[in-house]
Image: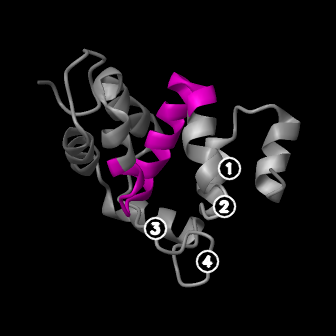
Amino acid sequence: MTTAGRSSVHVMGTSVDVRRDLASLADPRRAEASSRFLQMVPDGYGQGDRAIGVAVPDQRRVPARYWRDLSLVETTDLLHGEVHEERLRSLREVGNRDRAAAEDEFLLRRYRVMPRVMLRYATEKFAPQRRRDYLSGIL
């Protein structure tokens, strides 16, 4: 296997592989800056999150290597983790794969309790009115 996040080769993978590859790209200085920016403090909008400091281009590459093989169970495992980068990428990949299923099976059940940043990422490709409905909580 090549260095994590550096290959577009398709390989079988699990949530454990995604976590391992993201962790191998962690940057403590970037994590500290991300924590401040995303307000990962009590009463901040990122409360409860933990950033590991993986650059966005690397975040995109890691799950993409495994995505075709990750089941909904594996994806849910990543979504329930405390690491911001894991959850962010999982939500985006679910949305890219099957937006209708992601909305029906995941968002409609959880959008009222999701952190605001997570909900923004999850709905970023929705039609503007549908996105406003989610963000305002009127569905």
Q: Secondary structure at mark 1?
A: helix
Packing grade of label 4 (10 A; few <14, some 14-19, many >=20) is: few
Which residue corresponds to the image point at 38% horizontal and 36% vertical from the top-left? 72
Whether residues under marks 1 and 2 lie with C-beta atoms below 8 angstroms apart, the answer is yes
The CA span between labels 1 and 2 is: 6 Å
Quarter-of-image position of residue 131: top right
Residue at image mark 1: 120
Residue 135 position in % (x across, y down):
78, 54
Q: What label does residue 44 carry, if any? A: 4
Q: Residues within 10 Å of mark 1 (few under 14, many from 20)?
A: some
Q: Are marks 2 and 4 in contact (CB under 8 Å)?
A: no
- The magenta stretch spans which residues? 77-101
Q: Secondary structure at mark 3?
A: loop
Q: Quadrant of residue 67?
A: top left
Under mark 3, the amino acid is Asp
Q: In this rendering, would 100 be left or right of 35?
A: right
Q: Amino acid at mark 2?
A: Arg
The residue at which mark 3 appears reads as: 49
Name the front one of labels 2 and 4.
2
Q: Is residue 99 magenta?
A: yes
Circle 2 SS class: helix
What is the distance, in whole Å, between disc 4 and disc 1 at their CAs?
Answer: 16 Å
Q: Are marks 2 and 3 in contact (CB under 8 Å)?
A: no
Mark 3 or mark 4: name the one nearer the start of the chain.
Answer: 4
Q: Which mark is residue 116?
A: 2
Picture coordinates of residue 122 (x, y %)?
62, 43
